[in-house]
Image (tube, rainbow, N blue to C red):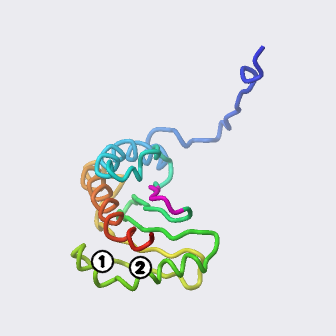
Amino acid sequence: MDPTDLVFYLRDSNDKEDEKGTRFEIRRRYWEYALKFIKEENFDNKSFDNVNTSKENWINGTFGIGGFAICCIANYDFARVDVYFGKTNANENKIAFDNVMLHKLEIESNLGVNLEWDRGDDVKRSIISYRLENVSIYNENDWLQIAKFHAKWSKKFIDAIVPYLK
């Protein structure tokens, strides 16, 4: 007998993650819905090609620099897209953030918005963000707006910010 046929997994009967209506099930359904838009918008850069649905409130796309990511977040009261600087070495994150920050005016001018710039001096990570307020992952009527926001702004961040990281 093949040893892989003998492998089985036990599921905790108290694990309610997949039950209908839980935050985990709602998140999985939202990401299944939104990933079509996000992958289509980022088709040319392939940043989200290997991303699957998630039970978390976030998914990450990549752009070829380990420890850095484009992060799409969906919450009960807003949606957000981040450029996430999360290498294990905090100094590397701060240097990269500072290099991008040198181009803040140009980036924001090209995007036509003011971004949130969080160097995170007291933590390891740094983040550049843009938010969509007054939407909720728990309201399926908001899903199209949130998905299009995630798709559009993940692509915009890749085009406008990532070149300053390479």
Magenta span: 60-65
Q: Reply yes or no: does residue 63 show up in magenta.
A: yes
Q: Contact (CB < 8 A) between labels 2 and 1?
A: yes
Question: Viewed as shown, does residue 59 lie left or right of 2?
Answer: left
Residue nearest the observer in this picture, 163 or 59: 163
> Observer-nearest residue: 56 or 69?
69
Residue 163's spot in the image, x, y percent?
38, 69
Percent coordinates x, y for residue 24 in the rendering: 49, 47
Q: Tag 1: residue type?
A: Ile
Numbered tag placed on residue 107 in the rendering: 1
Report which quarter residue 111 is drawn in: bottom left
At horizontal 74% and vertical 26% (from top left) the residue drawn is: 7
For the residues labelled 2 and 1, the Cα–Cα distance comes to 9 Å
| Residue 32 falls in image quadrant | top left
Work out whether residue 109 or residue 134 is closer to the camera in this orientation and state it. 109
SS class, disc 1: helix
What residue is pinned by disc 2?
A: 100
Query: Quick one: 17 or 41, which is closer to the camera?
Result: 41
- For marks 2 and 1 on the same chain, the one whose residue lies earlier in the sequence: 2
Q: Image height check: is 106 above or below 158?
A: below
Which residue ends up furthest to the top in the rendered image? 1
Q: Amino acid at mark 2?
A: Val
Residue pictured at 56% horizontal, 64% vertical: 67
For label 1, the crowd category at 10 Å Cα-Cα, with few meaning under 14, some 14 to 19 and many 20 or more, is many
Q: Can you name the residue that lies furthest to the front here?
A: 166
